Image: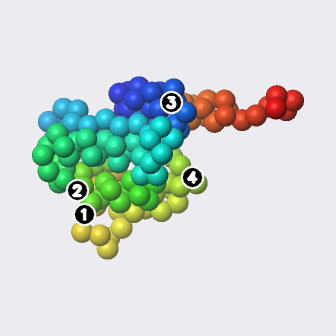
Amino acid sequence: MRLALDVAREAAASADVPVGAVVLSPDGEVWGTGRNVREAEADPTGHAEVVALRQAARTRGEWRLDGCTLVVTLEPCTMCAGAAVLSRVARVVFGAYDDKAGAVGSLWDVVRDRRLNHRPEVVAGVLAAESAALLDDFFRSQRVTPGSG
């Protein structure tokens, strides 16, 4: 999770929401990292998880990421939770909950939907305070203060 937080900080430097993701191989090797790039690349699918999953699949040489772990600083949205299911990761580990768009337990629970053919294990709240603080700081800096324009 610390590596995911470091990657998230890179997103903040480029005006993207600071979310970072890492995909670990079954042996714990880093196969992919990703940060939000929606603003930087004008890509609506440029979420940290999607970027990291794509890189991990290229590293592995196939789309199935059986046995891998997706670590992300913010609870995945529906798109990213779906990507985790479709890529067959074994587990999803996340930091801060997302009460507005979270799809791994908060608003929806895509990854544990019994109708799907794959359901990764979920580990929630890992370094949640640090992950939330990074997001809070980013959004606080985005707000216009009265009298500043």
Q: In the displayed image of the protein, which residue is found farthest to the bottom?
A: 115
* Amino acid residing under circle 2: Arg
Q: Work out whether residue 125 or residue 117 is closer to the camera in this orientation and state it.
A: 117
Which circle marks residue 88 in the picture?
2
> Compared to 117, does 149 lie above or below?
above
Residue at x 26%, y 37% (from the top left corner): 32
Quadrant in which residue 27 is drawn:
top left
Query: Badge 4: few (under 14), some or many (20 or more) residues near its Cα, within 10 Å?
Result: few
**Residue 100 point in image, percent of width and height:** 58, 54
**Dot 4 corresponds to which residue?**
99
Which residue occupies 32% across, 56% down?
Answer: 83
Q: Earlier in the sequence, mark 2 or mark 1?
A: 2
Disc 1 residue type (three-letter): His
Residue at x 51% of width, y 30% of height: 14
The residue indicated by pointer 1 is: 118
For disc 2, the neighbor class at 10 Å (few under 14, some 14 to 19, many from 20) is: many
Q: Nearer the viewer, mark 4 or mark 2?
A: 2
